Amino acid sequence: MHALKARVENGRYVIDEPAELPEGAEVELMIVKGAMSAEERAELLEAIEEAEQDIEAARVVDEAEVWARLQAIS
């Protein structure tokens, strides 16, 4: 995942970063209304990257297994 920061000029989104995607690739923009600081956004992106690494390394537990474990301890 890669986050981009854009601004609106004359009704158009302007992104001042080089594209690391193939020509014609579609991207989805999400409007952020300043709810997160730059530090919070960086922490969130780091957590997402860690989660993606956990998934790729199969360090995850299925939801059904989580519920089974919770029921076993109650």
Image: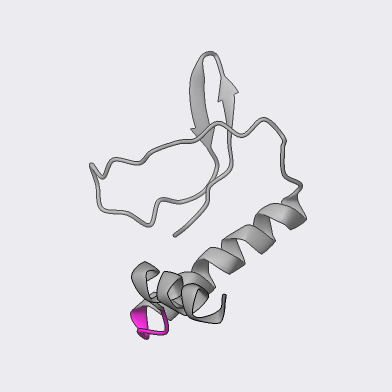
Q: Picture coordinates of residue 29 (x, y %)? A: 45, 36
The quadrant of the image that shows the C terminus is: bottom right
Is 35 placed left or right of 25 in the picture?
right
Prevailing secondary structure of the magenta residues: loop
Which residues lie in the magenta part?
56-60
In the image, residue 10 sits, relative to residue 29, either above or below, namely: above
Say which residue appears at 55% left-offset and 31% top-offset.
Answer: 31
Say which residue appears at 40% left-offset and 78% top-offset.
Answer: 61
Is 5 placed left or right of 60 in the picture?
right
Q: Is residue 7 magenta?
A: no
Q: How are the residues colored?
A: one colour
Say which residue appears at 28% left-offset and 40% top-offset.
Answer: 26
Nearest the camera: 40 or 54? Answer: 54
Q: Picture coordinates of residue 63 (x, y %)? A: 38, 68
Q: Is residue 59 magenta?
A: yes
Q: Picture coordinates of residue 64 (x, y %)? A: 35, 70
The quadrant of the image that shows the N terminus is: bottom left
In the image, residue 41 sits, relative to residue 59, either above or below, namely: above
